[in-house]
Amino acid sequence: MDFIKKDINGESFNPFRLIGKDWFLLTSGNMNEYNTMTASWGQMGILWNKPVFTTVVRTSRKTFELMEKNEFFTASFFDEDYRSALNFCGSHSGRDCDKAKETGLVPVELEGTVAFEQAKAVMVCRKLYEKDMAEDDFLDKSLLKFYEKDPFHKTFIGEIVGYYTK
Ligand SMILES: Cc1cc2nc3c(=O)[nH]c(=O)nc-3n(C[C@H](O)[C@H](O)[C@H](O)COP(=O)(O)O)c2cc1C
């Protein structure tokens, strides 16, 4: 089924459920070179008078390399049927396997970047701002527990330039 571009202002969804419970695939690159990973932390809202999507990516991820290299990224949202595919993409690195081949997810080009055919909704985002998290910037130092073993996240804020559903 083809994706249809919608005006995001006319849509209604619960971002807490969509991001935190349903999860999404964060994808960056083009059809020649892309990577995707599962994410469940993020934000959506308004900044600089634009609709924005914010994602945080640890610098150790393969997806991080693609996020650094490319101007666009996508957030693809799925029905519950794809939970096992999302679990796979969140526990394997694109350095070691072809996630699309392993899960059956089919990459599709949207606005020059990559999303997945099976997604129920996709946000295409253009990077506006990026910032490495740093220890000194944490006001609540208890949050540093998230970084005892793993590297800090980098924050990427993207303008939602396309919102697609079916
Ligand atoms: C439910 C879930 C949520 C996740 N959320 C994030 C996230 O928001 N940011 C992040 O950097 N990694 C997150 N991860 C971890 C990455 O998806 C995981 O490390 C993945 O294997 C990275 O793949 P890559 O090396 O191909 O980029 C999450 C994993 C799961 C299972």
Image (cartoon, rainbow, N blue to C red):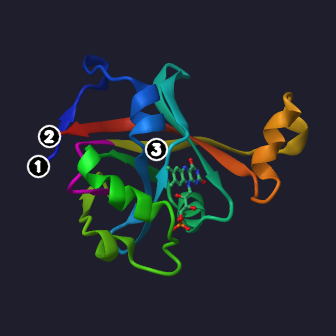
Range of residues picked out in magenta = 114-122
Residue 121 magenta = yes
| Label 2 Cα crowd, 10 Å radius (few <14 / some 14-19 / many 20+) | few
Label 2 is placed on what type of residue? Lys
Tell whether circle 3 marks a residue whose Cβ is less than 8 angstroms from ligand 1. Answer: no
Residue 2 is labelled as 1
Residue 25 magenta-highlighted = no
- For the point 37% across and 37% down, the residue is 161
In the rendered structure, which amino acid carries the disc numbered 3?
Arg
- Whether pointer 3 and pointer 1 mark residues with C-beta atoms closer than 8 Å, the reply is no
Q: Quadrant of residue 61?
A: bottom right
Task: Indicate which disc, 3 or 1, sits on the residue closer to the N terminus.
Answer: 1
Q: Which mark is residue 166?
A: 2
Q: Which residue lies at the image location 83% right of the left edge and 54% below the top edge?
A: 148
Q: CA distance from mark 3 to mark 1?
A: 22 Å
Instruction: Choose mark 3 or mark 1, whichever is in front.
Output: 1
* Residue at horizontal 42 percent and vertical 58 percent from the top: 87
Q: Earlier in the sequence, mark 1 or mark 2?
A: 1
| Left or right, residue 6 beside residue 61 | left
